[in-house]
Image: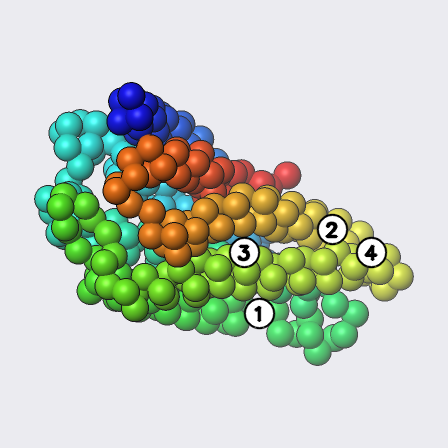
Amino acid sequence: MTSTTAIDILHFTQQYSLYSTSVLFTIGAIGNLLNILIFTTLKLFRNNQCVLYVVTESISNIIQLTTFALVYQLPAIYLTDPASSSLFWCKFRSMIISSCTLISFSTICFSASHQYLSTSHVFYLRQLTTIKLATFLICTSVIISILHTIPFGIFLEIRSSACAVFNQNMTNYLSYFYYPVLSGLLPVLIASVFSILAYNNVRRIVRRQVPIVRRRLDQQLTAMILIRVIVFIVLTVPYDIQRMYTYIAKVNQSNLLYFAIINLIGAVLGTFFNLNYAVRYHR
């Protein structure tokens, strides 16, 4: 009876993940393409460094959503998971997901910090917000994110038709640093602090001799970034906690019902987490 229930839960989880990912891919692809189109064509946003971060994030989001869609669509098409037989796909999909996650999260942090600097009453800080700096930060983020995926390519293996990390050191890294810090607390903390500081700057910007058009643009961009950061925190933290627990508790199929329940919880939280890449947040 327990085994049957577990199998039913796993089947439901598989179907849920398939359809939710398809919906997110459709919504996210359209939303991110609109972000790119709007922010690159409107004169109001030209030569604004924050827009460069938003466009970079949108491109990364499209790649991320496409990869997630393939992860769930390919098993449905071929009736078997290619990651359980193809070592290349097993490694490649995780490397893409990891790199795009870090790129997207870093651009959120860059957007928040840029908005703080650009709205600061200190002239020197405002001078730091240049296209050159934005380009440098984005290129550095992309390079570091790609280099960071090398351990995934090394330690991901296929055992008993399961694509996973079996190396204990890599498992510890994922459990105690990657999920709780690198893709959890660190970007959440950085984005939160700078978005709050930027919001306070905008509240005081009325006292400065700033053109009305510039003032309105700063207010709109700051509000947009603040909303993005709030959404980012709400959608990211629960999923990171679940993933961290899965690695620390070493959840496996030895207890099939428990494994199925954790899988279902992970799928639901994963859907919310993936909304990070699908939300269209400009006004």
Give whichever of 160, 4 is nearer the camera.
Answer: 4
Tell which tag, 1 or 2, sits nearer the viewer. 2
Tell which tag, 4 or 3, sits nearer the viewer. 3
Measure the alpha-carbon separation of dots 1 and 3.
17 Å
What is the secondary structure assignment of the residue under circle 1?
loop
* Residue at the image position 13 percent from the left and 46 percent from the top: 160
Circle 1 is placed at which residue position? 130
**Which label's residue is closer to the chain start, 2 or 3?**
3
Q: Residues within 10 Å of mark 1 (few under 14, many from 20)?
A: some
Please, which residue is most extreme toward the bottom here?
124
In this rendering, position of residue 75 left or right of residue 241: left
Measure the alpha-carbon separation of dots 4 and 3.
21 Å
Amino acid tagged 2: Gln
Q: Residues within 10 Å of mark 3 (few under 14, many from 20)?
A: many
> Are discs 1 and 4 less than 8 Å apart at CB?
no
Residue 108, which numbered label?
3
> Are discs 1 and 2 less than 8 Å apart at CB?
no
In this rendering, position of residue 38 left or right of residue 200: left
Quarter of the figure that contains the C terminus: top right
**Which label's residue is closer to the chain start, 1 or 3?**
3
Q: Residues within 10 Å of mark 2 (few under 14, many from 20)?
A: many
What is the secondary structure assignment of the residue under circle 2?
helix
Give whichever of 2, 50 is nearer the camera.
Answer: 2
